[in-house]
Image (cartoon, rainbow, N blue to C red):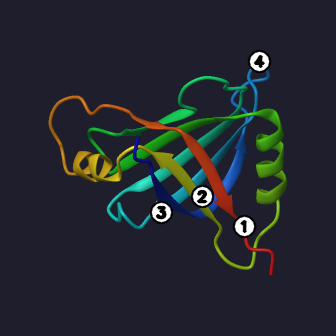
Amino acid sequence: MKEEFLQLTVLSSEVVKASMHEEAQISVSCSASELPKYNFTLLLQRKQQDLGHIGHIVFDKKRPLVLALANLNPTSFDEFFDLVRFSPPRNPSIYLKIKDIQALLDMSERSDGDLPKINIHDIGWRFPLT
């Protein structure tokens, strides 16, 4: 199975807690060089994910928005949270592992009908220290 990475450049991040009854999420606003016309939001939530994909990417049908949702195990969520609490000297990068980057690019050009979800199989990041 061929897997490729969608590289996202982090523009800003924030912790979101919609209710006292819900777990906090990390919302990351990003840009993707492969999708320059789109605003990209990645929502990360703390959730143990043992089987299958860890999240998905969805295109908004009416606006140039892309939403990605990914589950991180508690250790990775806490590690990511500790990193985004500080302002790095340059923009960090996040890498979403997907099966077919070309399918994602083709989907970004469609404006008709239901757009399928693109599964996220893994996530990685690069945060500058100095």
Q: Position of residue 84 (x, y in %)?
A: 76, 58
Q: Which residue is mark 1?
A: 127
C-alpha gap between disc 4 and disc 2: 29 Å
Residue indicated by mark 3: 31
Disc 3 to disc 4: CB gap under 8 Å: no
Per the image, the residue denoted by label 4 is 21
In the picture provided, is 62 more to the left or to the right than 117? left
Q: Exactly how many numbered labels are in the figure?
A: 4
Residue 23 got which mark?
Answer: none
Q: Residue at x 85, y 53 (%)?
A: 82
The mark closer to the camera, 1 or 4, is 1
Q: Nearer the viewer, mark 3 or mark 4?
A: 3
Farthest residue to the left: give it: 112
Quick one: label 2, few (<14), some, or many (20+) residues within 10 Å? many
* Distance between the alpha carbons at the discs numbered 1 and 4: 31 Å
Q: Given the image, on which type of amino acid does mark 3 rest? A: Ser
Closest to the observer: 32 or 17?
Answer: 32
* Front disc: 1 or 3: 1
Q: Quadrant of the C terminus?
A: bottom right
- Mark 2 and mark 1 lie on one chain; the one further toward the N terminus is 2
